[in-house]
């Protein structure tokens, strides 16, 4: 395929309700939408770098720079027979995995459309629908949290994940367990703790949690391995796993027993699949994480999550949980049994609403082949 034209949209979308984690509160989401035009087809991807470098070191502006000045120039105007050929052209760019993943997602979409097959099929996914769980931000009171959990369960979500931070951990978990003794429940600390907090985790170990996500440093493997040794509850790593090599390190050191896979964090669908396959070979369960993507990113994530070893419910909620007006049609929904259908149309299988894209775009960049 000849890559003729690539457009970037810096978008900003208000969230339905603020999302609070140990890293802060988001009221809106800034991401980059990547559009590739090639031989009459259009591919869409979403770069999940945020406005602030608190989850990842990348930001919208750093990714914009890397996309515009390095990644896009390496493939624009080129005739590419495979996605691997694109990746090879910018393999010399280190890091900047979210920038790469946004571009790669648009490539996967346009390559799937060229074959007139769904992205799920091109990725090798077999599931027709995927199990989903809710990710609930920290609330101003335990009462509000319980209401949120109740609403997520009523909507069908198969498990609940809550965010925790020092001094906002045992009390919410205890309250949820009192109300809902048996629901699948997991907690996500987004790296807010150190080993000095080991007593907190020993207490959390008594609440029958599905897993504890990223309790310690975002770049740490060793202390996670020391903590995991002390706990029955599996530790799952999110921030720490940026590549297959990180994944190998984590398993070799026994730093965790489950992995959260986000294509953005690991540099794209190709690396995400490698991690998925490696974990499958080691009997390590994985789930598909989320970055509060718009429907463009979420449709692609659902396709990836249709691969077999995504055996834990995904952090992928219905449209109405994130945005009043999303960028895609039709909406992505969740059944009463906590399942989301894997789109079957060509590529990501959803259409982009150009009016809403225009309305939410703050800045555009357009790169044509010469
Ligand atoms: O740690 O999984 C995380 C959102 C932004 C940044 C990090 C995380 C999250 C979520 C939201 O948990 C998951 C979703 O998109 O529903
Ligand atoms: Mg997480």
Image (cartoon, rainbow, N blue to C red):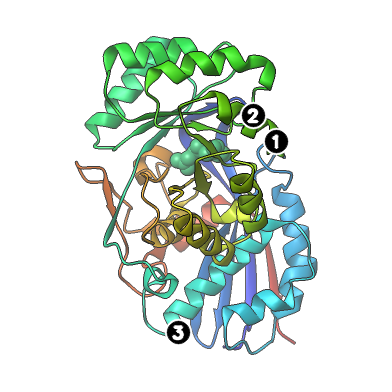
Q: Residue at x 40, y 71 (%)?
A: 124
Please tell me which residue lies in front, 215 or 23. 215
Q: Residue at x 78, y 61 (%)?
A: 94
Lower position in the chain sequence, tag 2 or tag 3: 3
Whether tag 2 and tag 3 are in contact, CB under 8 A, the answer is no
Q: Position of residue 70 (x, y in %)?
A: 79, 69
Determine whether, in the image, residue 24 is placed left or right of residue 296.
Answer: right
Mark 1 vs mark 2, CA separation in Å: 6 Å
Q: Position of residue 148 (x, y in %)?
A: 35, 23
Mark 2 vs mark 3, CA separation in Å: 48 Å
Q: In this orientation, does residue 94 appear?
A: yes
The quadrant of the image that shows the N terminus is bottom right
Whether tag 3 and tag 1 are in contact, CB under 8 A, the answer is no
Residue 259 in the image: above or below residue 166: below
Determine whether, in the image, residue 98 is placed left or right of residue 119.
Answer: right
Tell which quarter ligand 2 is in.
Answer: top right
**SS label for mark 3:** helix
Q: Position of residue 361 (x, y in %)?
A: 59, 54
Residue 11 in the image: above or below residue 342: above
Which disc number belongs to residue 114?
Answer: 3
* Residue depth check, mark 2 versus mark 3: number of the one nearer the observer: 2
Lower position in the chain sequence, tag 3 or tag 1: 3
Give the residue pinned by disc 2.
Answer: 226
Question: Badge 1: few (under 14), some or many (20 or more) residues near its Cα, within 10 Å?
Answer: some
Determine whether, in the image, residue 216 is placed left or right of residue 234.
Answer: right
Q: In this orientation, does residue 140 appear?
A: no
Whether tag 1 and tag 2 are in contact, CB under 8 A, the answer is yes
Give the residue pinned by disc 1.
Answer: 222
């Amino acid at each position: 395929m000849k890559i003729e034209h690539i457009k970037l949209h810096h978008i900003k979308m208000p969230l339905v309700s603020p999302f609070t984690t140990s890293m802060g509160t988001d009221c809106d989401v800034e991401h980059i939408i990547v559009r590739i035009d090639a031989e009459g087809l259009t591919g869409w991807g979403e770069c999940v770098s945020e406005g602030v470098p608190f989850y990842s070191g990348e930001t919208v502006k750093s990714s914009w720079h890397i996309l515009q000045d390095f990644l896009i120039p390496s493939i624009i105007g080129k005739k590419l027979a495979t996605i691997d050929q694109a990746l090879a052209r910018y393999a010399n760019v280190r890091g900047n995995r979210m920038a790469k993943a946004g571009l790669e997602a648009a490539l996967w979409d346009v390559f799937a459309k060229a074959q007139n097959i769904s992205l799920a099929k091109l990725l090798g996914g077999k599931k027709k629908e995927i199990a989903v769980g809710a990710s609930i931000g920290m609330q101003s009171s335990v009462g509000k949290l319980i209401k949120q959990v109740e609403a997520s369960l009523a909507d069908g979500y198969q498990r609940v994940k809550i965010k925790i931070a020092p001094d906002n951990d045992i009390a919410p978990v205890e309250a949820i367990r009192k109300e809902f003794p048996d629901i699948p429940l997991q907690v996500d600390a987004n790296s807010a703790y150190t080993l000095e907090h080991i007593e907190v985790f020993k207490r959390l170990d008594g609440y029958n949690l599905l897993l504890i996500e990223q309790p310690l440093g975002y770049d740490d493997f060793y202390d996670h391995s020391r903590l995991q040794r002390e706990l029955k509850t599996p530790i799952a790593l999110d921030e720490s796993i940026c590549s297959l090599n990180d994944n190998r390190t984590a398993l070799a050191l026994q730093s965790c027993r489950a992995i959260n896979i986000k294509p953005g964090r690991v540099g794209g669908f190709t690396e995400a699949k490698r991690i998925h396959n490696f974990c499958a070979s080691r009997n390590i369960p994985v789930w598909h994480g989320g970055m509060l993507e718009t429907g463009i990113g979420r449709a692609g994530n659902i396709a990836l999550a249709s691969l077999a070893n995504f055996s834990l419910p995904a952090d992928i909620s219905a449209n109405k949980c994130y945005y009043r007006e999303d960028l895609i049609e039709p909406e992505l929904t969740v059944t009463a049994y906590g399942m989301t259908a894997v789109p079957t149309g060509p590529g990501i299988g959803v259409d982009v609403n150009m009016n809403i894209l225009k309305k939410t775009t703050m800045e555009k960049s357009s790169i044509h082949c010469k």
